[in-house]
Image: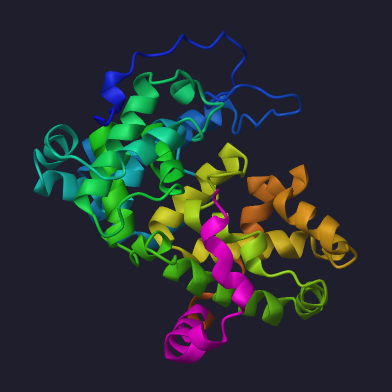
Amino acid sequence: MEKKRIDDYEPGPLPSPRKMDRFGFLKQENNNPPDGLTKGREERRVRKWRKMIGVGGSDWKHYVRRKPHVVKRRIRKGIPDCLRGLVWQLISGSRDLLLMNPGVYEQLVIYETSASELDIIRDISRTFPSHVFFQQRHGPGQRSLYNVLKAYSVYDRDVGYVQGMGFLAGLLLLYMSEEDAFWLLVALLKGAVHAPMEGLYQVGLPLVQQYLSSFDRLMKEQMPKLGEHFTQEMINPSMYASQWFITVFSYSFPFHLALRIWDVFLYEGVKIVFKVGLALLKYCHDDLVKLPFEKLIHALRNFPEDAMDPDTLLPMAYVIKVSRRLEELKQEYNKDGKLSLPAEIKGTEKQMQ
């Protein structure tokens, strides 16, 4: 039987109109993300950013070289939403990849075939289903998502397609074109600026296992009381933190918080995922140490609304120091940690199902 491609499907009916938040997600009860800065402050902030990056990003590299601390501080405060797509491309190195590879994306989408096409089509409706861009079945948003994921599965056949990749590509498509989103995905997975992420999606999820092992050690070192309680209740990071790394918090975290984390992640690398995870546990520490297994699992997958406030959580995360210890744990893991990794952490492949 001939395989169906997404282009063979007719778009479904448009979803019935409902109220949306400022990011394009359907509003739920008690789901009102903060509107951020006042209009005047936001306009001043945008002007500062435009001056910093120049027309189309022409001044960006020069400014980063001259004032790296200013750039880091401004990114940690949050990139203006109207400039987010462009800045993400600049800080990730994806703009350079795009310019060096003209026509490659079109070739991958139009002329190549992928063994993952049916898997991608099956999963597309699970990616940001409450966002207006992706709601229409086989509509423009779902087609763009299919094209980006299919193109990557052809570009890197060793990785191909894994379900969690849809949330990365979906998030990027909300801020840039298909081709731009594709090259940013390449920049992340292949390591244009920071360590490559492809190990998060390779067979056996080797990088997920390394990160969970390191996170477990960091948590027990920085919060020994909570670590002891988790050990007694047989809680390990694979039960709650796999998706943090696989989707960089884009799977189940409030969107306004995920965006702020992504701003920093693209500039500073994966250490912010560790920092935010540790900050969450610290914020909820006194409650978590009292809970039995079943309630712990629920709490670790459903953090309270006040813990998800970027202006509360991120300053806590920024002061946590992990860089040097992460490097030590990486060396230790590569040397002999794989042999002693808890069996429970090896079951992460099922976490995105």
Q: Residue 8 is drawn in which quadrant?
A: top left
Q: Position of residue 225 (x, y in %)?
A: 82, 78
Residue displayed at 26% across by 45% down: 115
Judge whether 323 appears above or below 165 on screen.
below
Residue 201 vs 257, above or below: the answer is below
Which quarter of the picture shows residue 187? Answer: bottom left
Indicate left or right for 27 with 86 as reference: right
Magenta: main secondary structure? helix
- Is residue 17 visible from the viewing direction of this image? yes
Q: Quadrant of the N terminus?
A: top left
Segment tinted magenta in the rendering: 326-353
The type of colouring in the image is rainbow
State yes or no: residue 334 in magenta: yes
The structure residue drawn at horizontal position 68% and vertical position 45%, both measured from the top left corner, is 309
- Residue 177 location in percent, x, y? 28, 31
Pick out the residue farthest to the front. Answer: 1
Residue 70 visible in the current orientation: no
Q: Nearer the viewer, residue 23 or 239?
A: 239
**Could you tell whether 129 is left or right of 183 in the image?**
right
Please report the residue visible at 62 percent of the width from the left and 80 percent of the height from the top: 217
Q: Quadrant of residue 253?
A: top right
**Image-based side of 96 in relation to 81, left or right:** left
Residue in front for this viewpoint, 262 or 7: 7
Q: Is residue 265 magenta?
A: no
Q: Please provide percent x and percent y for residue 329.
A: 51, 83
- The spot of residue 271 in percent (x, y) is 49, 66
From the viewer's perspective, is residue 191 above or below residue 344? above
* 234 w.r.t. 71: above or below: below
